[in-house]
Amino acid sequence: MGMQRVNSITQYISAGLAPSDFYPMPGRLFNTPAVTVLSFTAKID
């Protein structure tokens, strides 16, 4: 999770709403959902 750079591409990965292989138990038991809001701003010089 978080901001990562992979193959020269910057990406943000959130916990989301789907189950993950990261957790030892299937599904989302005790794993709260997450929503991420990204705000993009342009800086003109």
Image (cartoon, rainbow, N blue to C red):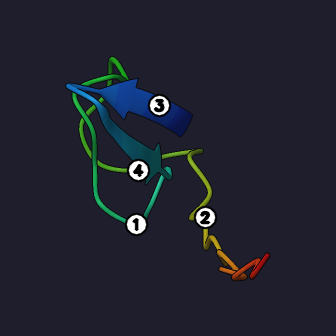
Using a 10 Å C-alpha cutoff, classify the residue at mark 4 as few (fewer than 14 neighbours), some (14 to 19) or many (20 or more): few
Task: Measure the C-alpha gap from mark 2 to mark 3.
Answer: 18 Å
Q: Amino acid at mark 3?
A: Gln
Residue drawn at 41 percent across, 50 percent down: 28
- Report whether 38 appears left or right of 11: right
User: Residue 5, percent across and down?
Assistant: 40, 29
Find the distance from the CA under tag 1 to the CA under tag 2: 7 Å
What residue sits right under mark 3 in the picture? 4
Label 3 vs label 4: CA separation?
24 Å
Is residue 21 shown above or below 28?
Answer: above
Question: Which comes sooner in the sequence, label 2 or label 3?
Answer: 3
Q: Which residue is mark 4?
A: 28
Q: Amino acid at mark 4?
A: Arg
Look at the numbered discs 1 and 4 and tell me whether their residues touch, using CB distance below 8 Å: yes
Relative to 11, say whether 1 is above or below. Answer: above
**Mark with earlier residue (3, 4):** 3
Q: Tag 3 or tag 1, which sits nearer the N-term?
A: 3
Question: Amino acid type of disc 2?
Answer: Ala
Q: Earlier in the sequence, mark 1 or mark 4?
A: 1
Query: Where's residue 39, x and y in %?
Result: 70, 81
| Residue 42 relative to residue 17: left or right | right
Q: Mark 2 or mark 4, which is nearer to you?
A: 2
Label 4: element kind: loop
Mark number displayed over residue 41: none
Q: CA distance from mark 1 to mark 3?
A: 19 Å
The quadrant the C terminus occupies is bottom right
Q: Quadrant of residue 10?
A: top left
Which residue is found at the position 56% from the left and 64% from the top?
33
In terms of image quadrants, where is residue 37? bottom right
* Within-10-Å neighbours for mark 2: few <14, some 14–19, many 20+: few
In the image, what residue occupies the spot 59% across and 44% down? 30
Above or below 25: residue 43: below
